[in-house]
Image (tube, grey):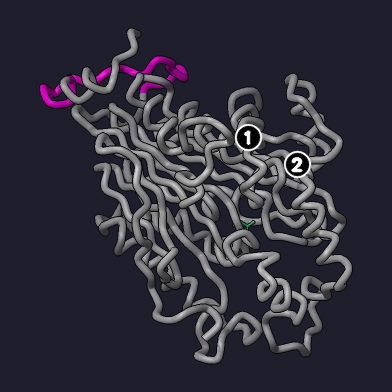
């Protein structure tokens, strides 16, 4: 198929013409609509990092969708920018290491029309786990490969395996954490406070920030045919117990996509999504006809209601952590919602009007620490 440029796309859209996908996966999409305008939505880091290039994740993904590229290929090319950028310390190369100082990565991708998906968890040595997740989807009968098996699979498919994905910065931060010996992940059953003194000290000294602690990128898109897809990729919780797997590679937790309903992914405390399968829940709310914002807020409310352990509550009895959802429905409407707001709490969007960072809609007032 010939590529179309942006002007041609706008024109084609205006007159009701849309382009077929460049690549077919052998099964007709369940949803085909005419005159759908492409949109890419992601976490804010999707419009913050360029890895030395000229485009951010959402810009590149949007351009490739408009050019008629395969939707999931376009989204994964976008998140690759962030995975490869050493400045983003929450994803891919240079992501926060685990408690042993090893960077272990989780990722998942899903096509909403074919319902195919692939994931990897606790993968070491590959800078772009999203691409390995896509390879699991394309080349296996399975959904999820983990640990050394995931790495062997990546090696067999020709991925470059590196001994260490730490950067100087991620290693220095880990050493600082290690020096202060954090017992936070091995819980004392009698302990009722949430954050260890070590975490507070590190935050106060700006060696860490809460976004990076659970940092992740989720990126979802809709193409000219109204097909939806999404990808979530992360280094997971900073200083986690080795082999801890978060929500990002787990379908329904950190990502879920159905072209008849919507695409939803998440950043923030992964355990909250594992306990509530919140991305799946929000897609189901979209299917029932809720708006993206209402569906996302209802998902957050479910997390709030199910957060009952005192160690996970602040002085108001509310969740003492952040979770954010990036919600796109089958009509191409979207919203970014989070447990708490704040002046720098944003999500990224790219439409025919270009990329922008927009404020997240919060469920709760105040901050997680109030
Ligand atoms: N949401 C990322 C994680 O918890 O691993």
Most foreground residue, 358 or 29: 358
Magenta residues, dominant SS class? loop
Categorize mark 1 by other alpha carbons within 10 Å: few (<14), some (14-19), many (20+).
many
* Residue located 69% across and 72% down the image: 205
Q: Secondary structure at mark 1?
A: helix
* Residue located 26% across and 59% down the image: 290
Does the magenta portion include 119? Answer: no
* Residue located 50% across and 37% down the image: 110
Most foreground residue, 84 or 300: 84
Read off the magenta span: 12-28
Residue reaching furthest to the left = 15
- The answer to whether residue 324 of the structure is visible from this angle is yes
Most foreground residue, 166 or 183: 166
Q: Position of residue 191 (x, y in %)?
A: 75, 88
Residue reaching furthest to the top = 2
- The answer to whether residue 80 of the structure is visible from this angle is no
Q: Quadrant of residue 312?
A: bottom right
Which quarter of the rendered picture does the N terminus lie within? top left
Q: Position of residue 122 (x, y in %)?
A: 75, 46
Decide if ligand 1 comes within 8 Å of the CB at mark 2. no
- Residue 164's tag is none
Does the magenta portion include 15? Answer: yes
Q: Are marks 1 and 2 in contact (CB under 8 Å)?
A: no
Question: Gap between marks 1 and 2, in whole Å?
Answer: 10 Å
In the picture, measured across the screen, residue 52 lies left or right of residue 144, that is left
Q: Position of residue 70 (x, y in %)?
A: 43, 23
Q: Quadrant of ligand 1?
A: bottom right
Most foreground residue, 167 or 215: 167
- Residue 123's tag is 2
Q: Quadrant of residue 37?
A: top left
- Residue 133's tag is 1
């Amino acid at each position: 198929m010939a590529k179309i440029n942006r002007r041609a796309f706008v024109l084609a859209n205006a007159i009701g013409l849309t382009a077929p996908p460049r690549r077919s996966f052998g099964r007709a999409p369940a949803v085909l609509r005419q005159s759908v305008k492409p949109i890419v939505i992601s976490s804010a880091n999707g419009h913050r990092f360029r890895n030395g290039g000229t485009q951010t994740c959402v810009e590149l993904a949007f351009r490739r969708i408009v050019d008629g590229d395969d939707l999931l290929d376009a989204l994964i090319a976008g998140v690759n920018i962030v995975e490869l950028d050493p400045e983003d310390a929450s994803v891919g190369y240079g992501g926060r290491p685990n408690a042993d100082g090893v960077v272990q990565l989780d990722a998942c991708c899903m096509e909403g029309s074919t319902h195919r998906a692939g994931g990897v968890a606790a993968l070491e040595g590959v800078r772009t786990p999203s691409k390995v997740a896509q390879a699991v989807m394309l080349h296996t009968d399975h959904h999820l490969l983990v640990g050394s098996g995931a790495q062997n699979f990546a090696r067999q498919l020709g991925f470059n395996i590196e001994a260490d994905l730490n950067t100087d910065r991620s290693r220095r931060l880990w050493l600082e954490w290690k020096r202060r010996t954090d017992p936070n992940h091995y819980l004392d059953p009698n302990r009722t406070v949430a954050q260890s003194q070590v975490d507070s000290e590190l935050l106060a000294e700006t060696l860490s920030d809460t976004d990076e602690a659970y940092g992740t990128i989720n990126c979802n898109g809709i193409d000219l045919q109204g097909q939806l897809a999404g990808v979530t990729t992360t280094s997971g919780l900073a200083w986690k117990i080795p082999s801890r797997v978060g929500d990002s590679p787990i379908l329904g937790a950190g990502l879920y996509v159905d072209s008849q309903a919507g695409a939803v992914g998440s950043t923030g405390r992964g355990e909250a999504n594992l306990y509530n399968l919140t991305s799946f829940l929000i897609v189901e709310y979209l299917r029932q006809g809720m708006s993206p914002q209402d569906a996302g807020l209802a998902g957050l409310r479910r997390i709030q209601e199910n957060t009952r352990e005192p160690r996970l509550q602040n002085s108001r009895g509310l969740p003492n952590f952040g979770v954010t959802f990036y919600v796109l429905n089958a009509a191409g409407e979207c919203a970014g919602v989070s447990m708490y707001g704040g002046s720098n709490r944003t999500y990224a969007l790219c439409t025919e009007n270009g990329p922008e960072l927009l404020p997240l809609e919060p469920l709760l007032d105040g901050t997680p620490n109030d």
